[in-house]
Image (cartoon, grey):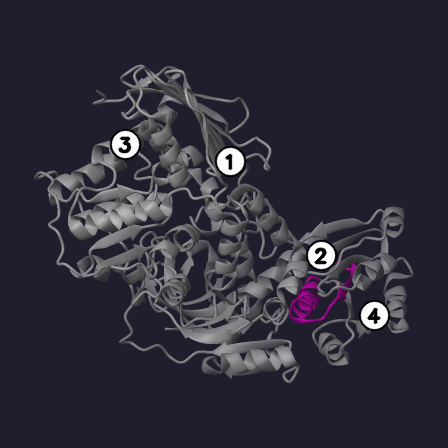
Amino acid sequence: MKQVVQNYKSGELTVLDVPVPGCKPGGVLVRSAFSLISTGTELMKVSEAGMSMLGKARSRPDQVAKVMQSVATNGLPATYSKVMGKLDSYTPLGYSLCGVVEQVGSGIDDVKVGDLVACAGNEHALHAELNWVPKNLYSRVPDGLEPRHAAFGTVGSIALQGVRQGEPRLGEVALVIGLGLIGQLVVQLLAASGVRVVGVDPDPARCELAERLGAEACGDPESAAVEAAVAELTGGHGVDQVYLAAGGGSNQPVELAARLARDRGRVVDIGKCRLDLPWNAYYEKELDVRFSRSYGPGRYDPAYELEGRDYPIGYVRWTERRNLACFLDLLSRGSVDVEPLISHIADFDDAVETYRRLKDGDLKAVAVLFRYPEGDAGEAVAPAVAVPAVKRTGGASSTPARSAGKPVRLAFVGAGNYATSMLLPHLAGREGVELSTVVTTTALSAANAQRKFGFAEATTDLDAVLDDRSIDAVFVVTRHSSHAELTQRALLAGKAVFVEKPLALTEDELAGVLAAVEKSGNDRLQVGFNRRFAPLLQEARQRFGARTGPASLRYLVNAGRLQHGSWYLQQGTEGSRFAGEGGHFIDTATWLLGADPVSVYAVATAGADDLQVVLRYPDGSTATISYVTTGAPGFPKETLDLVADGKVLRLDDFVRASVHGGKRWVSSRLPKARDKGQNAELAAFVKAVRTGGPMPVPLESLVATTAATLAVPAGLAAGVPVTLAGAR
């Protein structure tokens, strides 16, 4: 299928061939009929992409702050590589469309194949021939409503949410500053609510259009006619509400709002404009400044948008989905008319030229629609994922050595930040390795990975990959909740499997993986516990030498706070933070101490996510992992001390290491970057697949580390040490 994309680094805009997205549970696959260009938001993004790197940095100071924090935590080389990799990727455009349901995922019963729906979301309602849309981001189109009009659903919801924030009442007077697409819709919604409207915009054509659509008067912000109209309509008191629907870097809108608002009036920010509030003016009138968050309650909440968890109507009357449905209803009843806003309808194949004309000013428009060709009935659609039942039937075995000179063919399931920054750069171009296929549920991430790392094929069809006998190994680099299921499927298909941590989030999931090993006779499994492969730690362990007595190990992990919206915070589906990454540190301790733990004791700091996890080992050794989120962000993330036999091994964040004892050793130089072992780990895995030799880490150790990680919540609940079943 085709999709409009942009490279944020180079500014390139193109219509790209990408795989058809998979139809996941909890959503529908929609074939686009019309999608709407947001002439404000999208053109701002297109313009930013054409800026120099300095210009991009100036336009996004929030992102610059994140980069600086990453430099402090991960070092300059790793941060640079990650940032450049992210910039040099195709990103999608679009967030408002109307289309026909092509396939229905499990758990969906409110629409059926063939229904016309309006869709929202800058990750789901894209300028693409097909989109997967979760339940709370689509709404069925009322009978009789034109698809091109329903394509306005998302921007209509944005305008509607802004009006709701202003709490308009019959007979009030409102000022709308900025008469672009959102402003024109705000004017109509206010007029439909019995509010008298004055509009402000420097473009006479937009002012004339707003007056035709319900505004009492409109004019240039510098015009005395605007102030005169406000004075006449309000008896000189000023407007009850001001809606800021303008963009740009001028502070004129907020200054005008203060001048024309009444005492204790309401000012609602809908657009992205400069907000240097003149303190005296806003203080003296005690103006109520409010912000309107996009489509409404639910926006930016993964539980609502991705998991389909609705808010009870008794507590949240207007969610983003209810706003979408409401706006469609207003359109169908003629309370709002979007036909006069449509300046141009372009064929989807002409998307790049349309954006160029808009950017250069050759096409002056309020609203532009893309019209899509009717769907090809023969186009393949990726099926929903189903998990086969697993039973124990036999014993595990090893894989025979491969033919000499034949490359190891790898498939990746998932191509997110970790895969593209920490794994694939070490595999792309590696001798004896062929990147065969990348599989993702979103079409664009697969296409990006294919372009950047040279995969032979990109797809959203996992079954086809598992059925391909030429593929030797599958990398599972998806969200945590899918690791165990995908690992089972790949093992049962006879593939060697590299799964990023964690292997499992529950004991049942771990049992399922072991059952797949038993049933398939395939034990070719590696979990991404990379720290034991770090060259600096390997050398420090060698310098420390063999132990004769028990050891005491302390591992401080300064994990830090997660950014708002991180999927790591979705504990209901993705497990706790420690469940997701705690295995890294348990595995490192286990490797250094040369045995699997026999018990786990865990305590949590009151009111925080900080954990103290104490592991006991067969020879009496102990390891204490302090996993903290409340530390200083500038402090190193990982520090480790191993004490035994009159010696101390010290590791400082994989940058410096030392051993103190009979003969002191300090790492001779700082490495160019923090090497946490991914490259060496991947080399060991590829070698095992190529030669048929043992996996880099024994299966028993992977299972023991996973079991110890899963025992932490049980230990927290019980308040006593948890003995690990089968521990020797």
The residue at the far bottom in this view is 362
Does residue 341 sit above or below 124 in this rendering? Answer: below
- On screen, residue 359 versus residue 123, left or right, reads right
Three-letter amino acid code at disc 1? Lys
Q: Give neighbour class at mark 1: few <14, some 14-19, many 20+ (Cα, 10 Å).
A: many
Residue 110 location, quadrant: bottom left
Three-letter amino acid code at disc 3? Glu
The answer to whether one can see residue 486 in this image is no
Q: Give neighbour class at mark 3: few <14, some 14-19, many 20+ (Cα, 10 Å).
A: few
Looking at the picture, how far across and down is residue 394, in whole percent? Answer: 7, 39
Instruction: Tell me which numbered mark, 2 or 3, is placed earlier along the sequence.
Output: 2
The answer to whether one can see residue 708 in this image is yes
In the rendered structure, are the residues bearing label 3 and label 1 in contact, judged by CB atoms less than 8 Å apart? no
Instruction: Tell me which numbered mark, 3 or 1, is placed earlier along the sequence.
Output: 3
* Residue visible at 90% across and 72% down in the picture: 224
Nearer to us: label 2 or label 1? 1
Three-letter amino acid code at disc 4? Pro
* Region of the chain picked out in magenta, as a range: 169-193
The residue at which mark 2 appears reads as 269
The residue at which mark 3 appears reads as 507
Q: Is residue 192 magenta?
A: yes
Q: Give neighbour class at mark 4: few <14, some 14-19, many 20+ (Cα, 10 Å).
A: some
Looking at the picture, how far across and down is residue 187, in whole percent? Answer: 70, 67
At numbered mark 2, what does the secondary structure look like: helix, strand or loop? strand
The residue at which mark 4 appears reads as 221
- Distance of label 2 from label 3 (alpha carbons): 49 Å
Residue 464 location, quadrant: bottom left
In the rendered structure, are the residues bearing label 2 and label 3 in contact, judged by CB atoms less than 8 Å apart? no
Q: Is residue 511 magenta?
A: no
* Residue visible at 45% across and 25% down in the picture: 664
- Distance of label 4 from label 1 (alpha carbons): 52 Å
The residue at which mark 1 appears reads as 637
